[in-house]
Amino acid sequence: MKKLNLLLFALVLGIAVNAQDFNDYLEVSREVLKTEKKALIADLMQFSSEESQAFWPLYNEYEDAKYKVNTRYFNLVEKFADNFENMTDEVATEVINESISIKQELVKLEKSYAKKFMKILTPKRTIKYLQAENKIKAMIDAEMALQIPFLDEIED
């Protein structure tokens, strides 16, 4: 977990660079996080050979699906940042609606893939895996929340 904390810190520090550098940095950071996360899960779960053969292809499929949704989230954060100083009600509404849509899509994916994981792992092993997913996501969300300032109240 210490490695993951350092990686998250580095990811958040990269937000201050320009847009193209940020996008490049984000992709590199996402790849590093992907590798580290996979190693953490492998270490935590201690899969048997049979479990491993069934788990990793499904895990990769799930990660690919989440990657697409998380890209929407990063685009939303960028939109928020681009409009931070001059936020309009229209943009604020778009940000709210997209944020809710992203959360709903992630829940839908988790529900769908939990069922799939339970076909290859026991329910208890599936819970353990989902706990790891949730803890890693909570750490990422906490780091992001620390870096995204509150929108100051804008007088109408």
Image (cartoon, grey):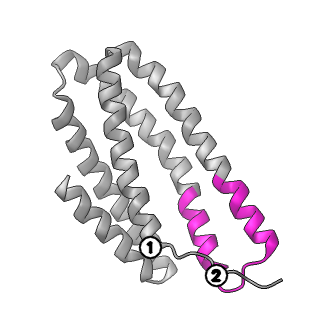
- Across and down, in percent, residue 10 comes to 29, 70
Q: CA distance from mark 1 to mark 2?
A: 15 Å
Horizontal arrangement in the rendering, residue 109 relative to residue 22 (left or right): right
Tell me what residue is drawn at x 38 percent, y 57 percent: 140
Q: Is residue 149 left or right of residue 123?
A: right
What is the three-letter code of the residue carrying label 2?
Answer: Asp
Q: Position of residue 73 (x, y in %)?
A: 56, 57
Element under disc 2:
loop
Quadrant, the C terminus: bottom right
**84, 42: nearer the viewer:** 84
Q: Position of residue 41 (x, y in %)?
A: 24, 38
> On residue 102, which mark appears?
none
Question: Which element is circle 1 on?
Answer: helix
- Pointer 1: residues within 10 angstroms few (<14), some, or many (20+)? few
Q: Is residue 67 above or below residue 90?
A: above
Dot 2, crowdedness within 10 Å: few (<14), some or many (≥20)? Answer: few
Against 107, residue 46 (above or below) is above
Instruction: Identify the residue under disc 1.
Output: 147
Q: Where does the magenta region start and end? A: 73-99
Name the residue: 56% across, 37% down: 107
Residue 123 is inside the magenta segment: no
Q: Which residue is pictured at 44% across the width and 73% down the height? A: 147
The residue tagged 2 is 152
Under mark 1, the amino acid is Gln
Residue 93 lies in magenta, yes or no? yes
Indicate the quadrant where residue 142 lies.
Answer: bottom left
Q: Position of residue 5 (x, y in %)?
A: 25, 60
Give the main secondary structure of the magenta stretch: helix
Q: Earlier in the sequence, mark 1 or mark 2?
A: 1
Q: How many marks?
A: 2
Quarter of the image holding residue 39? Answer: top left
Q: Residue at x 26, y 63 (%)?
A: 7
